[in-house]
Image: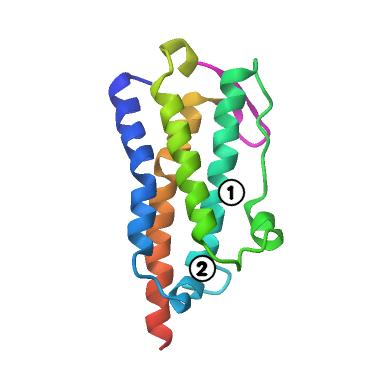
Amino acid sequence: MDSDIRAKLMSDYRDGYRAVADALEGATEVELDARPAPGKWSAREIVHHLADSEMMSALRVRWLLAADRPAIVAYDQDEFAKRLHYDRPIAASLAAFKAARESTAQLLDRLAEDEWSREGTHPEHGRYGMDTWLNIYSRHAHDHATQIVRARASASVRD
């Protein structure tokens, strides 16, 4: 990946928390629990997913950097949502998401070019390197911010 693309993706990654926080601004409990369609996640569930996903992604980066050709662990996000009590308040999960993202961004800012070429193996994706990771997580929060807005809007449709 060339440096201009990486810089753009890093900018998007850094901006992810802001996008999510903006999408949640002024959210009511009713809006947090509204589902845009049957089987779709509520804004509350999305926030908990973002926290869990960001913590998993932070571990993946650290394994890629600290271990030689690590096996990257997959997880089932739907099972996380079912088993990890995604009905709880969002403040701690939002803070965990923010902290994991900030910590990881600081780490990524310090990488030398050879560190960006490190890779491991993911059971679903096969070869999984730093650039793969950045491509996935640079837009992840923004995509979910859009879902949060849509989920919140569905509350007013039901009023």
- CA distance separating discs 2 and 1: 15 Å
Q: Taking 91 as reference, is 123 left or right? A: right
Which colour style is shown?
rainbow
Callouts 2 and 1 close, C-beta under 8 Å: no
Quadrant location of the C terminus? Answer: bottom left
Determine whether the residue tagged by mark 2 lies in a helix, strand or loop: loop
The image shows residue 2, relative to residue 20, as above or below, that is: above
Q: Which residues are magenta?
A: 117-128
Residue 152: image x %, image y %?
40, 72
Q: Residue at x 39, y 48 (%)?
A: 17
Residue 93: image x %, image y %?
53, 55
Determine whether the residue tagged by mark 1 lies in a helix, strand or loop: helix
Q: Which residue is mark 2?
A: 42
Q: Which residue is mark 1?
A: 52
Q: Quadrant of residue 144?
A: bottom left
Q: Taking 21 as reference, is 44 left or right? A: right
The image shows residue 24, relative to residue 55, as above or below, that is: below
Q: Residue at x 37, y 74 (%)?
A: 153
Magenta stretch encompasses residue 124: yes
Q: Residue at x 61, y 68 (%)?
A: 87
Choose between 73 and 61: the one closer to the eye.
Answer: 61
Front: mark 2 or 1: 1
* Amino acid at pointer 2: Ser
* Amino acid at pointer 1: Asp
The image shows residue 159, relative to residue 133, as above or below, that is: below
